[in-house]
Amino acid sequence: MHEMALCESLLQAMEEAGRTNRFTRVRRVRLEIGRFAGVEVEALRFGFDVVMRGSLAEGAELVVQEVPGRGWCFGCNDTVPLEHRLDSCPRCGGDRIQPSGGTEMTIKDLEVE
Amino acid sequence: MCTVCGCSGATVGDKDHHHGHDDHDHHHHDSGVLDYGAGPAHAHAPGLSQTRMVEIERGILSKNDSYAADNRALFERRGIFAVNLLSSPGAGKTTLLVATLTALAGRWPVGVIEGDQQTSNDAERIRATGAPAVQINTGKGCHLDAHMVGHAMESLPTLDDGVLFIENVGNLVCPAAFDLGEAKRVVLLSLTEGEDKPLKYPDIFAGADLVLITKADLVPHLDVDLGAIDRALARVNPRAETLLVSSRDGAGMAGWLGWLEARRRDALRTLAAQAEARAAALRAAVAE
């Protein structure tokens, strides 16, 4: 989706962290992106290179760790692992599932100088 | 001074006052339009020092989320029931709002925030009903964010104990990720869009409290399978309520207005209970 907007938010977050933690250069960024976060990692990488140009994170390495999907199955009344958003419940085969994990978009840590 | 981001002296009423900060940049016109299309690129001076790790552990959209929390606090303080309306372009958000505002006919204080990439056409349509409206032009942006909404609130009347409708940019993808501080999310799906839209764009439908199936007056002219829409919706959002409406002939509008009334009542009762509990605690604190 809006990968450019995500990259701009990411840059803002890094600039804030730079002011708080006193760094002026970001070498590496580690993100956790949930399987159901709606983020296209390739588009994110493209947007990252463009948005970071001229910033404290220009040329930084982007590391994306995928977080597996989970859903709340209304049939089982329990959390079950989900491969795809529209999969049926792997346990009961039911279709009434609300994704409950794998929607996160988190900045884990930064390697800075 | 701007209460949202602290930007100095800027209101929508200012004449073409342009201001930029390190984290946001926008243009205030005198025509009730907030313009986010322009702004210089970020500029930073790299420095030199030793490499180290900094733990951050925060959401990428945490900035938006903190603005959304500020908006939500403002809405709760003023008893404003805020509704975020989302859909693809042309599903009938503005037409629904015009019909809704006309039907409400001054029953509650109402205000509208209109989001579009360009033009103030929608805000003008809303103002023609007598309701105050502020237009946000997102420029290149594909969604409203909470910071824009916070600024837009500065140019609306106070709306105490009223209803705020936020009409998002017509887009079934990006607006899903941006919390605006709303109490409820309403997604519109018009009958001409195809029964499988919820499966194709699951994020936006997964976040909906209510799905309004619009343009119900077209049913006789289409080969649309309403059951298939319900099944598709149930796959991505088992909790969402659905209502079939036509802004054109008014069918189903009573159900939609009833939904608004009931949800607003619930929200205001919750706020009243919280206020009473606080008042009781304060009284107890001075009783001894």
Image (cartoon, coloured by chain):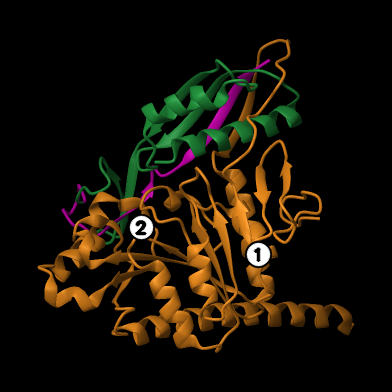
Chain colours: A green, B orange
Residue furthest left as drawn = B223
Q: Is residue A111 magenta?
A: yes
Work out whether residue B68 can be spotted.
Answer: no
* B148 is higher (above) or lower (below) than B167: above
**Whole-percent x, y for residue A40 in the image:** 36, 34
* Amino acid type assigned to the residue bearing label 1 in the image: Met
- Residue named by callout 2: B89
Classify mark 2: residues with Cα within 10 Å, few (<14), some (14-19) or many (20+).
few
Measure how far apart labels 1 and 2 are at the Cα level. Answer: 24 Å
* A17 is higher (above) or lower (below) than A83: above
Query: Which element is circle 1 on?
Result: helix
**Whole-percent x, y for residue B91 in the image:** 32, 64
Query: Which element is circle 2 on?
Result: loop
Chain ID at mark 2: B
Quadrant in which the N terminus of chain B is drawn: bottom right
Bounds of the magenta segment: A89-113
Residue, x 48% and y 81% (percent of image)? B101
Classify mark 1: residues with Cα within 10 Å, few (<14), some (14-19) or many (20+).
many
* Amino acid type assigned to the residue bearing label 2 in the image: Pro
Q: Quadrant of residue B245?
A: bottom left
**Whole-percent x, y for residue A85 in the image:** 27, 46
Residue, x 56% and y 81% (percent of image)? B130
Question: Which label number is shown at residue B227?
Answer: none
Is A53 left, or right, of B143 in this rendering?
right
Question: Which label number is shown at residue B153?
Answer: 1
Give the total of numbered labels.
Answer: 2
Q: Quadrant of residue B255?
A: bottom left
Q: Is residue B8 magenta?
A: no
Residue, x 67% and y 79% (percent of image)? B160
**Whole-percent x, y for residue A95 in the image:** 20, 57
Quadrant in which the C terminus of chain B is drawn: bottom right
- Please determine if labels 1 and 2 lie on a single subunit: yes
